[in-house]
């Protein structure tokens, strides 16, 4: 059973998938940083200094000034600003993956368009051709 698991785990597809998951997790962190630290501040500034990560609806009715204050006391809140950031993360990751797949498909298509060399005849066919030519000339 151990050998069977070892064969499964060391198969190329499993290793490739593990590498993809690790790189995807790191890429997700980079995209989150781009959204939270680069994209959202200018958008918030254009909308009158709004910090999207601090937008929330207080369901308790107390009227907390900040999301941190509401969370500190455990008040029920709807964090729609965080949701907006998450949706932007998703859109950017989806677009990046789309561009990578599109690039890979165009490379694959270029490979398919290359003219393929005709298959070389087998040794038997070459030998028979030589015999035929020898009998013709002989």
Image (cartoon, helix red, strand yellow):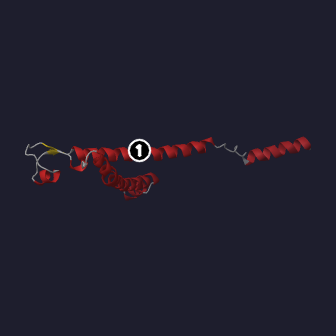
Q: Please state which of residues 117 and 45 is positioned toward the viewer in this rendering.
A: 45
Q: Name the residue under label 1.
A: 95
State the image quarter where residue 111 is shown.
Answer: top right
Residue sitting at the far right: 138
Location of the C terminus (image quadrant): top right
Give the number of marks. Answer: 1
| Viewer can see residue 4 | no
Tell whether 52 sits left or right of 59.
right
Residue 47 image offset from top left, x and y in percent: 27, 44
Residue 1 image offset from top left, x and y in percent: 37, 56
| Viewer can see residue 36 | yes
Tell whether 75 sits left or right of 112.
left
In the picture shown, does residue 129 fall above or below 28? above
Q: Please state which of residues 103 and 39 is positioned toward the viewer in this rendering.
A: 39
Residue 132 image offset from top left, x and y in percent: 84, 42
Count residues near mark 1 (Cα–Cα under 10 Å), then give few for <14, some for 14-19, many for 20+: few
Tell whether 138 sits left or right of 62.
right
Residue 3 image offset from top left, x and y in percent: 40, 58
Q: Please state which of residues 101 and 86 is positioned toward the viewer in this rendering.
A: 86
Secondary structure at badge 1 equals helix
């Amino acid at each position: 059973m151990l050998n069977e698991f070892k064969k499964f785990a060391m198969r190329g597809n499993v290793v490739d998938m593990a590498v993809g998951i690790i790189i995807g997790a790191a890429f997700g962190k980079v995209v989150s940083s781009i959204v939270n630290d680069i994209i959202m501040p200018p958008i918030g500034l254009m909308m009158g200094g709004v910090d999207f990560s601090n937008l929330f609806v207080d369901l308790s009715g107390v009227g907390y000034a900040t999301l941190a204050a509401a969370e500190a006391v455990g008040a029920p809140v709807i964090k729609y600003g965080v949701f907006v950031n998450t949706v932007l993360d998703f859109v950017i990751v989806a677009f990046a993956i789309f561009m990578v797949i599109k690039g890979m498909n165009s490379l694959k298509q270029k490979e398919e368009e290359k003219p393929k060399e005709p298959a070389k005849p087998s040794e038997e066919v070459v030998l028979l051709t030589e015999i035929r030519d020898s009998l013709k000339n002989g």
